[in-house]
């Protein structure tokens, strides 16, 4: 099976403070390097954001198709854009956050 290097999940951020800026830049780069098998049907997006008054980093992963649950992630919620899972992070190392996002992005189809 041939692997493409083009990202198949888009990345968005909406930060209201500078607290997570460096981490989110690293996460965005890492997510941009995720590659899927050619013709992968389950595309989607990752959004990192902050909520005023909450020091945690919030992450939503939206898939075009429903996926099996991944430990630590809530959802799915259903929207016009797909199936949304979310999670918050408060003190995890950036590499651990990226690993968790990767597990959700590559979750098996339900």
Image (cartoon, helix red, strand yellow):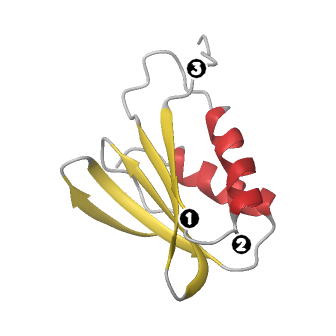
- Residue 6: which disc? 3
The residue that appears at 71% across and 54% down in the rendered structure is 99
Compared across the picture, whether 99 is left or right of 35 comes to: right
Q: Position of residue 25 (x, y in %)?
A: 71, 49
Residue 77 lies left or right of residue 27; in this view the side is left
**Label 1, label 2: how many angstroms apart (C-alpha)?**
9 Å
Task: Name the residue: 37% across, 46% down.
Answer: 63
Image coords of residue 89 (percent x, y): 64, 74
Q: Are marks 1 and 2 in contact (CB under 8 Å)?
A: yes
Disc on res. 93: none
Residue 19: which numbered mark, if any? 2
Q: Quadrant of residue 39?
A: top left
Q: Which mark is residue 15?
A: 1
Identify the image quadrant of residue 71.
bottom right
Q: Confirm whether residue 72 shows in the render.
A: no
For numbered disc 1, what is the local secondary structure?
A: loop
Seen at 44% across and 62% down, the residue is 69
Mark 2 lies on a secondary structure that is loop
Classify mark 1: residues with Cα within 10 Å, few (<14), some (14-19) or many (20+).
some
Mark 3: few, some, or many residues within 10 Å (few <14, many ≥20)?
few
**Tag 3, which secondary structure?**
loop
């Amino acid at each position: 099976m041939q692997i493409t290097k083009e990202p198949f999940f888009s990345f968005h951020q909406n930060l209201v403070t500078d607290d997570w800026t460096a981490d989110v830049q690293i996460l965005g780069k890492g997510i941009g390097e995720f590659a899927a098998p050619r013709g992968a049907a389950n595309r989607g997006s990752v959004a990192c954001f902050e909520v005023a008054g909450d020091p945690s980093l919030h992450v939503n992963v939206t898939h075009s198709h429903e996926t099996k649950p991944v430990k630590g992630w809530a959802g799915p919620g259903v929207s016009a854009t797909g199936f949304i899972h979310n999670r918050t992070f408060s003190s995890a190392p950036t590499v651990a956050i990226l690993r968790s996002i990767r597990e959700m992005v590559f979750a098996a189809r339900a």
